[in-house]
Amino acid sequence: MTHAKVVIIGAGGRLGAALMREYDDKFDITGFNHLQVDLESPDEMRKKLCAIDFGVLINAAAFTNVDLCETERDRAFRINTDAPRILAEICRDKKAKLIHFSTDYVFDGEKRQLYTESDPANPISVYGESKREGEKLVLQTHYQHLVVRVSWVFGPDRSSFIDAVMKRAREQEQVDAIEDKFATPTYTQDIAHALLQLLFNARATGILHFANSGECSWQEYAQWALDCCLSEGIALKTKSVGALKLADMKDWVARRPVYSVLSTAKYSALTGDSPRAWRDAVADYIKRFYSQK
Ligand SMILES: NC(=O)c1ccc[n+]([C@@H]2O[C@H](COP(=O)([O-])OP(=O)(O)OC[C@H]3O[C@@H](n4cnc5c(N)ncnc54)[C@H](OP(=O)(O)O)[C@@H]3O)[C@@H](O)[C@H]2O)c1
Protein backbone atom coordinates (compact mmCIF):
# COMPACT_ATOMS: atom_id res chain seq x y z
CA MET A 1 0.00 0.00 0.00
CA THR A 2 1.33 3.46 -0.83
CA HIS A 3 1.72 6.18 1.76
CA ALA A 4 -0.95 8.25 0.06
CA LYS A 5 -2.27 11.25 1.95
CA VAL A 6 -5.73 10.59 3.37
CA VAL A 7 -7.81 12.96 5.51
CA ILE A 8 -10.55 11.66 7.83
CA ILE A 9 -13.26 14.02 9.09
CA GLY A 10 -15.19 12.70 12.09
CA ALA A 11 -12.05 11.01 13.48
CA GLY A 12 -13.60 10.83 16.96
CA GLY A 13 -16.79 9.02 15.90
CA ARG A 14 -17.65 5.31 15.83
CA LEU A 15 -16.66 4.85 12.20
CA GLY A 16 -14.07 7.61 11.93
CA ALA A 17 -12.04 6.32 14.89
CA ALA A 18 -12.06 2.80 13.42
CA LEU A 19 -10.84 4.16 10.08
CA MET A 20 -8.07 6.07 11.86
CA ARG A 21 -6.90 2.89 13.59
CA GLU A 22 -7.20 0.57 10.60
CA TYR A 23 -5.44 2.96 8.21
CA ASP A 24 -2.74 4.20 10.55
CA ASP A 25 -0.04 1.95 9.10
CA LYS A 26 -1.32 2.05 5.53
CA PHE A 27 -1.57 5.74 4.65
CA ASP A 28 -0.28 9.13 5.65
CA ILE A 29 -3.39 9.93 7.70
CA THR A 30 -4.59 13.26 9.06
CA GLY A 31 -7.69 13.04 11.24
CA PHE A 32 -9.94 15.86 12.40
CA ASN A 33 -12.41 15.41 15.22
CA HIS A 34 -15.33 17.72 16.00
CA LEU A 35 -13.18 20.10 18.04
CA GLN A 36 -10.55 20.34 15.31
CA VAL A 37 -12.94 20.99 12.40
CA ASP A 38 -16.54 22.07 12.99
CA LEU A 39 -18.76 21.19 10.03
CA GLU A 40 -21.03 24.06 11.04
CA SER A 41 -18.23 26.49 10.24
CA PRO A 42 -17.58 26.71 6.47
CA ASP A 43 -14.73 29.18 7.07
CA GLU A 44 -12.95 26.81 9.44
CA MET A 45 -13.43 23.88 7.06
CA ARG A 46 -11.97 25.81 4.13
CA LYS A 47 -9.12 27.30 6.17
CA LYS A 48 -7.95 24.01 7.70
CA LEU A 49 -8.47 21.75 4.68
CA CYS A 50 -7.22 24.07 1.95
CA ALA A 51 -3.96 24.41 3.90
CA ILE A 52 -3.07 20.71 3.61
CA ASP A 53 -2.32 18.34 0.79
CA PHE A 54 -4.29 15.10 0.30
CA GLY A 55 -5.55 12.75 -2.41
CA VAL A 56 -8.60 11.34 -0.60
CA LEU A 57 -10.88 12.85 2.04
CA ILE A 58 -13.23 10.56 3.95
CA ASN A 59 -16.19 12.21 5.66
CA ALA A 60 -17.40 10.03 8.54
CA ALA A 61 -18.82 13.00 10.49
CA ALA A 62 -22.55 13.61 10.63
CA PHE A 63 -25.37 14.72 12.91
CA THR A 64 -26.47 11.15 13.63
CA ASN A 65 -29.05 11.57 16.41
CA VAL A 66 -32.15 10.72 14.41
CA ASP A 67 -34.66 12.11 16.94
CA LEU A 68 -32.70 15.30 17.65
CA CYS A 69 -32.56 16.02 13.91
CA GLU A 70 -36.38 16.39 13.97
CA THR A 71 -36.20 19.26 16.47
CA GLU A 72 -32.90 20.73 15.22
CA ARG A 73 -33.70 20.73 11.52
CA ASP A 74 -31.47 23.66 10.52
CA ARG A 75 -28.48 22.13 12.30
CA ALA A 76 -29.15 18.76 10.62
CA PHE A 77 -29.07 20.41 7.19
CA ARG A 78 -25.97 22.47 8.02
CA ILE A 79 -24.01 19.36 9.07
CA ASN A 80 -25.50 16.66 6.83
CA THR A 81 -26.18 18.68 3.66
CA ASP A 82 -24.25 21.97 3.49
CA ALA A 83 -20.98 20.65 4.97
CA PRO A 84 -20.66 17.68 2.56
CA ARG A 85 -21.20 20.10 -0.35
CA ILE A 86 -18.36 22.31 0.91
CA LEU A 87 -16.12 19.26 1.41
CA ALA A 88 -16.97 18.13 -2.13
CA GLU A 89 -15.98 21.54 -3.51
CA ILE A 90 -12.72 21.61 -1.56
CA CYS A 91 -11.88 18.13 -2.88
CA ARG A 92 -12.84 19.03 -6.46
CA ASP A 93 -10.60 22.11 -6.37
CA LYS A 94 -7.69 20.03 -5.04
CA LYS A 95 -8.37 17.21 -7.54
CA ALA A 96 -8.89 14.91 -4.57
CA LYS A 97 -11.59 12.27 -4.18
CA LEU A 98 -14.31 12.63 -1.53
CA ILE A 99 -15.71 9.50 0.08
CA HIS A 100 -18.82 10.53 1.95
CA PHE A 101 -20.78 8.21 4.25
CA SER A 102 -24.55 8.06 4.12
CA THR A 103 -27.33 5.90 5.42
CA ASP A 104 -30.04 3.31 4.74
CA TYR A 105 -32.43 5.89 6.28
CA VAL A 106 -32.66 7.63 2.88
CA PHE A 107 -35.23 4.90 2.07
CA ASP A 108 -38.83 4.80 3.30
CA GLY A 109 -38.70 1.04 3.99
CA GLU A 110 -41.80 0.20 1.96
CA LYS A 111 -40.04 -1.95 -0.65
CA ARG A 112 -39.56 -4.88 1.76
CA GLN A 113 -36.85 -6.27 -0.51
CA LEU A 114 -33.14 -5.50 -0.78
CA TYR A 115 -32.50 -1.86 -1.69
CA THR A 116 -30.14 -1.29 -4.59
CA GLU A 117 -28.29 1.93 -5.42
CA SER A 118 -30.76 2.69 -8.23
CA ASP A 119 -33.86 2.47 -6.01
CA PRO A 120 -35.45 5.87 -5.47
CA ALA A 121 -34.72 7.42 -2.09
CA ASN A 122 -37.71 8.67 -0.14
CA PRO A 123 -36.63 9.70 3.35
CA ILE A 124 -39.25 9.80 6.10
CA SER A 125 -37.22 11.72 8.71
CA VAL A 126 -35.26 14.97 8.85
CA TYR A 127 -32.09 12.92 9.37
CA GLY A 128 -32.80 10.88 6.21
CA GLU A 129 -33.78 13.97 4.25
CA SER A 130 -30.68 15.93 5.28
CA LYS A 131 -28.41 12.96 4.47
CA ARG A 132 -30.12 12.45 1.07
CA GLU A 133 -29.67 16.12 0.14
CA GLY A 134 -26.00 15.85 1.19
CA GLU A 135 -25.54 12.83 -1.10
CA LYS A 136 -27.01 14.69 -4.06
CA LEU A 137 -24.81 17.76 -3.61
CA VAL A 138 -21.65 15.65 -3.21
CA LEU A 139 -22.37 13.76 -6.43
CA GLN A 140 -23.38 16.90 -8.33
CA THR A 141 -20.12 18.61 -7.39
CA HIS A 142 -17.81 16.04 -8.98
CA TYR A 143 -18.41 12.81 -10.88
CA GLN A 144 -15.50 11.06 -9.16
CA HIS A 145 -16.83 11.44 -5.62
CA LEU A 146 -18.25 8.39 -3.86
CA VAL A 147 -21.17 8.11 -1.44
CA VAL A 148 -21.12 4.93 0.68
CA ARG A 149 -24.42 4.06 2.38
CA VAL A 150 -24.12 1.84 5.44
CA SER A 151 -26.61 0.49 8.02
CA TRP A 152 -26.70 -0.26 11.79
CA VAL A 153 -23.04 0.52 12.40
CA PHE A 154 -21.33 -1.03 15.44
CA GLY A 155 -17.76 -1.14 16.68
CA PRO A 156 -15.50 -0.63 19.69
CA ASP A 157 -14.98 3.11 19.43
CA ARG A 158 -18.43 4.30 20.48
CA SER A 159 -21.28 2.45 22.12
CA SER A 160 -24.24 1.48 19.93
CA PHE A 161 -27.36 -0.72 20.18
CA ILE A 162 -25.42 -3.96 20.66
CA ASP A 163 -23.35 -2.58 23.56
CA ALA A 164 -26.48 -1.24 25.24
CA VAL A 165 -28.17 -4.66 24.90
CA MET A 166 -25.21 -6.48 26.45
CA LYS A 167 -24.99 -3.97 29.29
CA ARG A 168 -28.72 -4.41 30.03
CA ALA A 169 -28.46 -8.20 29.92
CA ARG A 170 -25.59 -8.14 32.42
CA GLU A 171 -27.46 -5.83 34.82
CA GLN A 172 -31.18 -6.59 34.39
CA GLU A 173 -33.53 -9.58 34.30
CA GLN A 174 -35.46 -8.30 31.28
CA VAL A 175 -34.18 -7.23 27.86
CA ASP A 176 -36.53 -6.41 24.98
CA ALA A 177 -35.93 -5.32 21.39
CA ILE A 178 -38.02 -4.49 18.34
CA GLU A 179 -39.10 -7.50 16.29
CA ASP A 180 -40.65 -5.73 13.29
CA LYS A 181 -37.86 -3.51 11.94
CA PHE A 182 -35.20 -5.02 9.69
CA ALA A 183 -31.74 -4.07 8.43
CA THR A 184 -28.18 -5.43 8.68
CA PRO A 185 -25.69 -4.80 11.49
CA THR A 186 -22.40 -3.63 9.99
CA TYR A 187 -19.03 -3.74 11.73
CA THR A 188 -16.79 -0.66 11.45
CA GLN A 189 -13.76 -2.89 10.94
CA ASP A 190 -15.43 -4.51 7.91
CA ILE A 191 -16.33 -1.09 6.49
CA ALA A 192 -12.68 -0.05 6.87
CA HIS A 193 -11.47 -3.18 5.05
CA ALA A 194 -14.05 -2.81 2.28
CA LEU A 195 -13.16 0.82 1.76
CA LEU A 196 -9.52 -0.10 1.16
CA GLN A 197 -10.60 -1.56 -2.16
CA LEU A 198 -12.48 1.60 -3.11
CA LEU A 199 -10.19 4.44 -2.04
CA PHE A 200 -8.11 4.51 -5.20
CA ASN A 201 -10.49 2.63 -7.50
CA ALA A 202 -11.41 5.00 -10.35
CA ARG A 203 -14.57 2.95 -11.01
CA ALA A 204 -15.82 3.46 -7.44
CA THR A 205 -17.93 6.57 -7.99
CA GLY A 206 -21.57 7.52 -7.41
CA ILE A 207 -23.55 5.68 -4.75
CA LEU A 208 -22.41 2.36 -3.27
CA HIS A 209 -24.10 0.25 -0.60
CA PHE A 210 -22.03 -1.60 1.98
CA ALA A 211 -23.28 -3.75 4.86
CA ASN A 212 -22.46 -7.12 6.33
CA SER A 213 -24.49 -9.83 4.61
CA GLY A 214 -27.88 -11.14 5.70
CA GLU A 215 -30.64 -9.29 7.53
CA CYS A 216 -32.35 -9.36 10.92
CA SER A 217 -34.71 -7.59 13.26
CA TRP A 218 -33.37 -5.72 16.28
CA GLN A 219 -34.64 -8.59 18.42
CA GLU A 220 -32.68 -11.17 16.40
CA TYR A 221 -29.59 -8.94 16.53
CA ALA A 222 -29.88 -8.60 20.30
CA GLN A 223 -30.53 -12.33 20.78
CA TRP A 224 -27.47 -13.23 18.73
CA ALA A 225 -25.35 -10.83 20.80
CA LEU A 226 -26.51 -12.58 24.00
CA ASP A 227 -25.92 -16.02 22.45
CA CYS A 228 -22.35 -14.96 21.62
CA CYS A 229 -21.84 -13.65 25.17
CA LEU A 230 -22.93 -17.02 26.57
CA SER A 231 -20.52 -18.92 24.32
CA GLU A 232 -17.75 -16.57 25.43
CA GLY A 233 -18.50 -17.25 29.11
CA ILE A 234 -19.80 -13.74 29.81
CA ALA A 235 -22.20 -13.82 32.77
CA LEU A 236 -25.68 -12.49 31.99
CA LYS A 237 -28.79 -11.97 34.12
CA THR A 238 -31.02 -12.78 31.17
CA LYS A 239 -30.44 -15.09 28.23
CA SER A 240 -33.40 -14.28 26.00
CA VAL A 241 -34.61 -11.09 24.39
CA GLY A 242 -38.31 -10.25 24.55
CA ALA A 243 -40.21 -8.71 21.62
CA LEU A 244 -41.30 -5.11 21.23
CA LYS A 245 -43.23 -3.61 18.32
CA LEU A 246 -42.06 -0.53 16.46
CA ALA A 247 -45.46 0.97 17.25
CA ASP A 248 -44.64 0.64 20.98
CA MET A 249 -41.76 3.13 20.72
CA LYS A 250 -43.80 6.11 21.89
CA ASP A 251 -40.72 8.15 22.91
CA TRP A 252 -39.28 8.20 19.41
CA VAL A 253 -39.76 11.51 17.65
CA ALA A 254 -38.56 10.54 14.16
CA ARG A 255 -40.13 7.96 11.86
CA ARG A 256 -37.79 5.15 10.88
CA PRO A 257 -37.94 2.78 7.88
CA VAL A 258 -39.22 -0.67 8.86
CA TYR A 259 -37.08 -2.40 6.25
CA SER A 260 -33.80 -0.96 4.99
CA VAL A 261 -31.62 -3.91 4.01
CA LEU A 262 -28.98 -2.80 1.51
CA SER A 263 -28.02 -4.91 -1.51
CA THR A 264 -24.23 -5.19 -1.80
CA ALA A 265 -24.29 -6.67 -5.33
CA LYS A 266 -22.67 -3.54 -6.79
CA TYR A 267 -19.90 -3.66 -4.19
CA SER A 268 -19.25 -7.33 -5.01
CA ALA A 269 -19.23 -6.69 -8.76
CA LEU A 270 -16.76 -3.84 -8.28
CA THR A 271 -14.38 -5.58 -5.90
CA GLY A 272 -14.93 -9.33 -6.31
CA ASP A 273 -15.42 -9.42 -2.53
CA SER A 274 -18.46 -10.54 -0.51
CA PRO A 275 -19.09 -8.96 2.90
CA ARG A 276 -19.06 -11.55 5.68
CA ALA A 277 -22.30 -12.51 7.44
CA TRP A 278 -23.47 -10.10 10.16
CA ARG A 279 -23.57 -12.98 12.68
CA ASP A 280 -19.87 -13.68 12.09
CA ALA A 281 -19.00 -9.99 12.41
CA VAL A 282 -20.95 -9.68 15.70
CA ALA A 283 -19.38 -12.88 17.07
CA ASP A 284 -15.92 -11.59 16.18
CA TYR A 285 -16.61 -8.22 17.85
CA ILE A 286 -17.83 -9.82 21.09
CA LYS A 287 -14.96 -12.29 21.17
CA ARG A 288 -12.39 -9.54 20.66
CA PHE A 289 -13.78 -6.79 22.86
CA TYR A 290 -15.93 -8.52 25.51
CA SER A 291 -14.70 -12.08 25.98
CA GLN A 292 -13.05 -12.90 29.29
CA LYS A 293 -11.79 -16.28 28.04
N1 LIG B 1 -24.51 4.67 13.46
C1 LIG B 1 -25.26 4.04 12.57
O1 LIG B 1 -25.95 3.07 12.88
C2 LIG B 1 -25.29 4.50 11.14
C3 LIG B 1 -26.19 3.89 10.26
C4 LIG B 1 -26.21 4.31 8.93
C5 LIG B 1 -25.35 5.28 8.49
N2 LIG B 1 -24.50 5.88 9.37
C6 LIG B 1 -23.61 6.93 8.85
O2 LIG B 1 -22.27 6.52 9.07
C7 LIG B 1 -21.45 7.65 9.30
C8 LIG B 1 -20.66 7.45 10.60
O3 LIG B 1 -21.58 7.36 11.69
P1 LIG B 1 -21.11 6.91 13.13
O4 LIG B 1 -21.89 5.71 13.49
O5 LIG B 1 -19.63 6.87 13.22
O6 LIG B 1 -21.67 8.14 13.99
P2 LIG B 1 -21.07 8.90 15.28
O7 LIG B 1 -20.35 7.93 16.15
O8 LIG B 1 -22.20 9.70 15.79
O9 LIG B 1 -19.97 9.84 14.64
C9 LIG B 1 -20.28 11.05 14.02
C10 LIG B 1 -19.14 11.99 14.25
O10 LIG B 1 -19.48 13.26 13.67
C11 LIG B 1 -19.04 14.26 14.57
N3 LIG B 1 -19.77 15.51 14.40
C12 LIG B 1 -21.05 15.79 14.70
N4 LIG B 1 -21.30 17.09 14.43
C13 LIG B 1 -20.16 17.62 13.94
C14 LIG B 1 -19.78 18.90 13.50
N5 LIG B 1 -20.63 19.94 13.50
N6 LIG B 1 -18.51 19.09 13.07
C15 LIG B 1 -17.62 18.08 13.09
N7 LIG B 1 -17.90 16.85 13.49
C16 LIG B 1 -19.17 16.62 13.92
C17 LIG B 1 -19.32 13.67 15.95
O11 LIG B 1 -18.55 14.35 16.92
P3 LIG B 1 -19.15 14.57 18.40
O12 LIG B 1 -19.70 13.27 18.85
O13 LIG B 1 -17.99 15.06 19.15
O14 LIG B 1 -20.24 15.61 18.23
C18 LIG B 1 -18.86 12.23 15.74
O15 LIG B 1 -17.48 12.10 15.98
C19 LIG B 1 -22.39 8.87 9.29
O16 LIG B 1 -22.39 9.42 8.00
C20 LIG B 1 -23.75 8.27 9.57
O17 LIG B 1 -24.77 9.07 9.01
C21 LIG B 1 -24.42 5.51 10.69
Image (tube, rainbow, N blue to C red):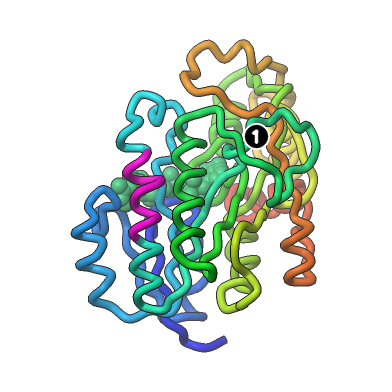
Left or right, 37 with reference to 255: left
57 relative position to 205: left or right? left
Q: State which quarter of the image contains the N terminus.
A: bottom right
Magenta part of the chain: 77-86
Residue type indicated by callout 1 = Ala
Q: Where is residue 52 in the image (x, y as percent from the top left)?
A: 28, 78
Q: Which of 134 and 58 is in front in this view?
A: 134
Along the viewing direction, whichever of 196 and 230 lies nearer the viewer: 196
Residue drawn at x 65%, y 66% is 194
Residue picked out by circle 1: 235
How would you rate the neighbour count of disc 1 (Cα within 10 Å): few for under 14, some for 14-19, many for 20 or more?
some
In the picture, residue 216 is in which quadrant?
A: top right
- Residue 284 % position (x, y): 69, 54
Q: Is residue 198 visible?
A: yes
Q: Left or right of 83: which side holds 117?
A: right
Relative placement, left or right, of 21 versus 261 is left
